[in-house]
Amino acid sequence: MLQNAGRILQAIPGLKPIVHCITNYVTVNGCANIVLACGASPIMAQNVAEVEEVASFAKALVLNIGTVDNVEAMVLAGKKAKSLGTPVIFDPVGAGATSLRNRTAERILKEVKPDIIRGNMSEVRTLGGLAASTKGVDAAAEDSAGIGTSAKMLRDIAKDLNAVVVATGVKDLVSDGRRVYHIENGHSMMAYVTGTGCMLSTMTAAYAAAAGKEGYLAAAIGATAAMGIAGEMAYEAVMTLGAGVGTFQQKLFDAIFAMDASTLLERGKVYEDTV
Amino acid sequence: MLQNAGRILQAIPGLKPIVHCITNYVTVNGCANIVLACGASPIMAQNVAEVEEVASFAKALVLNIGTVDNVEAMVLAGKKAKSLGTPVIFDPVGAGATSLRNRTAERILKEVKPDIIRGNMSEVRTLGGLAASTKGVDAAAEDSAGIGTSAKMLRDIAKDLNAVVVATGVKDLVSDGRRVYHIENGHSMMAYVTGTGCMLSTMTAAYAAAAGKEGYLAAAIGATAAMGIAGEMAYEAVMTLGAGVGTFQQKLFDAIFAMDASTLLERGKVYEDTV
Amino acid sequence: MLQNAGRILQAIPGLKPIVHCITNYVTVNGCANIVLACGASPIMAQNVAEVEEVASFAKALVLNIGTVDNVEAMVLAGKKAKSLGTPVIFDPVGAGATSLRNRTAERILKEVKPDIIRGNMSEVRTLGGLAASTKGVDAAAEDSAGIGTSAKMLRDIAKDLNAVVVATGVKDLVSDGRRVYHIENGHSMMAYVTGTGCMLSTMTAAYAAAAGKEGYLAAAIGATAAMGIAGEMAYEAVMTLGAGVGTFQQKLFDAIFAMDASTLLERGKVYEDTV
């Protein structure tokens, strides 16, 4: 799996795919920079008068509801991208935190049907509940599932949502509804930099653009491992320098910029779970 | 006072209070990162359809009019926070610069009644004038007050506004309407990084959330001293490295991340003024 | 020409001109910081209820359509600035990429008549076509011009638009409609940091504010050379440190902060073209 991911990563600079992002104003700069750092080309465009046109030439689309803006633009761009077979990555920031976010996430799931979803475990479980409830399934039962059953739960959610789903946390989980992988890279200091999740979703879009439809699972695993490894490398640099979170953020971009297939293979800790 | 501030700072990571920010798109990323760096948890949410819900679970609220957006959301969230006893911090960016900003600041003062106000001296004096004028007091007379009388003036403004007021500048002043403190930390290079004021307001919210209502004065003093000390430490690092403002910004975050009660006590220069 | 540019640069901190920016949410933080780093004072204000008031006291205005927001505010502020003789710098981000961007750029050209335009060669050629088409000139013929004729083409576009035009790329070109200069500073790593173009446009505004109307050409050349030199210096620092794009971005700000007339003269590679 990591060898596939490495090939995808190496293909990005040659393709220089345009990644269309409709996202939040908090972390948008980091999202644009992470796309550049891995060799792709970002375009942030959310005006309803142009998003379909942009989606028609972009090679991947990211929908991020971090500040729940531009939802109409997200639906318009999302439908256009789907109609063209362009991968749509959805980041359901704050799903579960407010009813507006739940309604918005539900709308995007229904109307756009994203190909890849990346959130933290709580957000992903909320999405699983939303998907389940619309089919009359007992969401409450799913919500009570413990962490021990999280791999199976994620597989079921991915199956329900018909998407590759990435649930990040202390341990990252990725599933396409059939197989489940967990990734043991990363560092706790990543939680002290705003936007590492948003940046991972955006980088996943760059990988997906280079991977093609059959490679979405490998793209999601590769991007998640790459971000985790970059976190480890940034932490090592910070320790060497006796520095803190400001330096960590900078070194995270340095590490993504330097990431290559051999680093992914050497440092990636990706394991398939039996579920 | 600094010992109280130190206890507040040490309490933040254990409480990990959610700080709700309705702010401007220029400095929002730094505001989120500064909240994380001192151990709290930021949520940037300004959609009118959810701000009251977010304000109902957040432990502090920041209203920043840097680009004079989302004023309805600010009033809605502010009223909700006040009704729950959640501290509301107001940053009147650019008050005095345009009539729109004056009207907006006046509306927030009247309708929300913030607990803590943080601005530069010019903005704070404008607020004092707005408050005064609504009560028929001679604002012009107040405005002509010289720098020598600034401590007394700040005390009167804080009393009028019934808030803890922080006026930052070469020397920072803090008053709760009874006592006045000045803080001699900081470095002139801070003026070369956009958003140090916005970040201080946001960090003050994290301190206030951990302090509780009786501790707002100590929270404001502690956050102001911490930011000033971080500026000094960042400048020292920049001098060692032979660097400039880009490095300074990074080192400022490193210093806030490393800030603890003993550093506050050792390096804090906080003095009570007799007024 | 570089000596003029050096004098302009040296004048900025004494004047501390206010640079009014109506720009995009992706790169706005870097734009504010670059203005500060060269000694000017940024104000980001886009509310239609205040932009004319802000434009009336600002010393330069930047209009950047990176996310095609706030177009009404741009036109209002632009007309006010022009009526006062305040320099207006236009950054036509993405012109040529969507029809919305073309219509918006055309509107700003017609209704505001910017003094300085800064874009990449593709954007500038699109503007040339828009200007030409409105006068019935054969835009298609111009569009087919090769890179060998780019100096002459830029001169004609600048003449048509009655503006100083900066076209950045591997080689940067600047023309006021009569003379054409090319600048050979810069480094390819600049393309891996989002917003270097937006930042150059904003810094050009600071230079133009200090230059006065007769100095717009020297201001544009000086800012472009300064940004290119900063890119070279940042790259040198990154090589010394064995770092990547995160560090590069930080060092770019360090270099702009340290930039002075003698560095401009020593390292600037500015040549007049014969056209």
Image: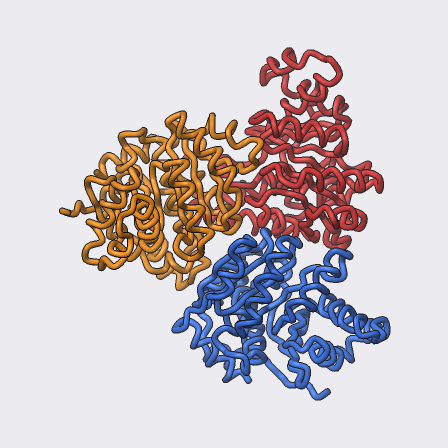
Chain colours: A orange, B blue, C red
Image point 80% across, 41% down: which residue?
C80
User: In x, y percent, where is residue C203?
Assistant: 66, 44
Residue C221 lies in what quarter of the image? Answer: top right
User: In x, y percent, where is residue A30?
Assistant: 47, 47
User: In x, y percent, where is residue A81?
Assistant: 42, 30
Q: Residue furthest left?
A: A274
Left or right of A233, for residue B133: right
Q: Is residue C148 above or below residue B135?
A: above
Quarter that holds the N terminus of chain B? bottom right
Q: Residue furthest bottom?
A: B274
Query: Of B49 and C196, which appears nearest the observer?
Result: B49
Left or right of C74, for residue A18: left
Number of numbered discs:
0
Query: Of C203 and C64, which appears nearest the observer?
Result: C64
Image point 47% across, 75% down: which residue?
B210
Left or right of B28, for residue A6: left
Residue C230 lies in what quarter of the image? Answer: top right
Query: Of C97 and C245, which appears nearest the observer?
Result: C97
Image point 70% across, 20% down: which residue?
C274
Query: Of A151 and B2, which appears nearest the observer?
Result: A151
- Residue B20 visible here: yes
Quarter that holds the C terminus of chain B? bottom right
User: In x, y percent, where is residue B176?
Assistant: 65, 81
Left or right of A200, for residue C200: right
- Residue B247 visible here: no
Q: Residue furthest front?
A: A136
